[in-house]
Amino acid sequence: MKVTLLVHTPEPERVTVAAALLCYQKGSPEEAWEKAGKESLRNRLFEELVRQGHGSTLEHASFTFGIEGISRACSHQLVRHRIASYNQQSQRYVDVGDPDYFVKPESLGDDDGGFEEVVAATVTYYREQIDRLKDAGKKGEQAQEDARYIIPNAGRTNLIWTTNLRNLLHVVHIRMCTRAQWEIRKMLHLCRRAVAAEFPLIAKYMVVKCHPLAIGYCDEEFRSCGFRPLREKVIPADDACPPGPGYKEEE
Ligand SMILES: Cc1cc2nc3c(=O)[nH]c(=O)nc-3n(C[C@H](O)[C@H](O)[C@H](O)COP(=O)(O)OP(=O)(O)OC[C@H]3O[C@@H](n4cnc5c(N)ncnc54)[C@H](O)[C@@H]3O)c2cc1C
């Protein structure tokens, strides 16, 4: 698996902070942009925005990742996150009949109970069906698009994923959790590492949801890994909320 940060908004923290400053001042967008150029102010405000959940400001910063060599099982989990843009290697246009086009989970180990044999048999079947479909007059992707039905979740794939910062943090919060699968967790760990190389302040907040820099407690209730306290330990269920402190019912 390989993850590359292909391209990003040139100054993601600055545009985020400029968007927030614009909300609270009389000045022009250009003035907000200039103010946000001051490093100490920018860094302080950026962290405030993330912590306070002023999420719309984070939508101005965009990141495009190249993701290589994940399984279709993993990519299917990723593309469920709809507030993003994806392009994925096609199994119609690309011939995937190659044992290297399969991801084997490490947990299966060397003594994998026949994984390699099943892959080899799958590839053989795939190749045979392509030949048969071609003999029947189908060409190129017309043969591949039907032969691919035998390719399992283990099939390898490549994607380009563009997401804004708000969604990136959301995806990391929920998919870095131990409740999510190892492969998407590993992929997001690599995304985090790629972001950290250029934007450590942003990577600081690319944490699992129970981390103190996110919600700070576990909301998984019955399936908690036990690493962080459950919500009810942190927030009593009978805590006064609606309509909130200071609200007075009209007579
Ligand atoms: C640990 C884990 C296990 C999972 N297991 C399963 C499973 O077994 N089966 C399964 O089908 N899925 C499963 N999922 C996927 C999950 O149901 C979601 O599809 C996935 O997390 C993407 O949803 P999202 O809200 O995070 O993101 P998005 O769909 O990208 O949405 C982002 C946000 O936009 C808003 N939004 C988007 N669309 C709407 C809408 N139509 N109406 C209102 N608000 C909207 C919501 O605030 C949402 O949180 C699992 C996810 C995780 C993290």
Image (tube, rainbow, N blue to C red):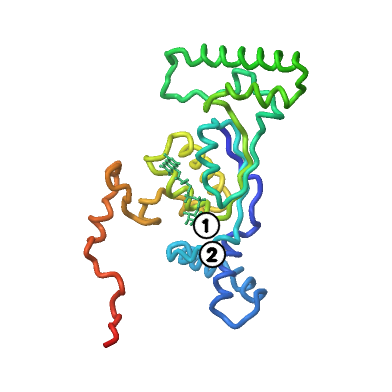
Label 2: which residue? 56
Find out whether the residues at labels 2 and 1 contact each other: C-beta distance under 8 Å.
yes
> What is the quadrant of residue 4 in the picture?
top right
Looking at the picture, tell me which residue is in the foreground, 127 or 17: 127
Query: Vertical placement of 177 versus 62: above or below?
Result: above
- The residue at the point 67 percent across, 32 percent down is 90
Query: Vertical placement of 66 versus 112: above or below?
Result: below
- The residue at the point 58 percent across, 31 percent down is 69
Give how far across and how far down residue 16 sits, in percent: 57, 64
- The residue at the point 55 percent across, 32 percent down is 72
- The residue at the point 67 percent across, 27 percent down is 145
Label 1: which residue? 166
Looking at the picture, tell me which residue is in the foreground, 131 or 213: 131
Q: Is residue 74 left or right of residue 216?
A: right
* Disc 2 Cβ-to-ligand 1 distance below 8 Å: no
Query: Residue 198: which numbered mark, if any?
Result: none
Looking at the picture, tell me which residue is in the foreground, 140 or 45: 140
Amino acid type indicated by mark 1: Arg
Give how far across and how far down residue 118 sits, in percent: 51, 14
Give how far across and how far down residue 88 sits, in percent: 64, 37
- In the rendered image, the residue lying farthest to the front is 136
N-terminal-most mark, 2 or 1: 2
Amino acid type indicated by mark 2: Ser
* Quadrant that contains the C terminus: bottom left
- In the rendered image, the residue lying farthest to the bottom is 251
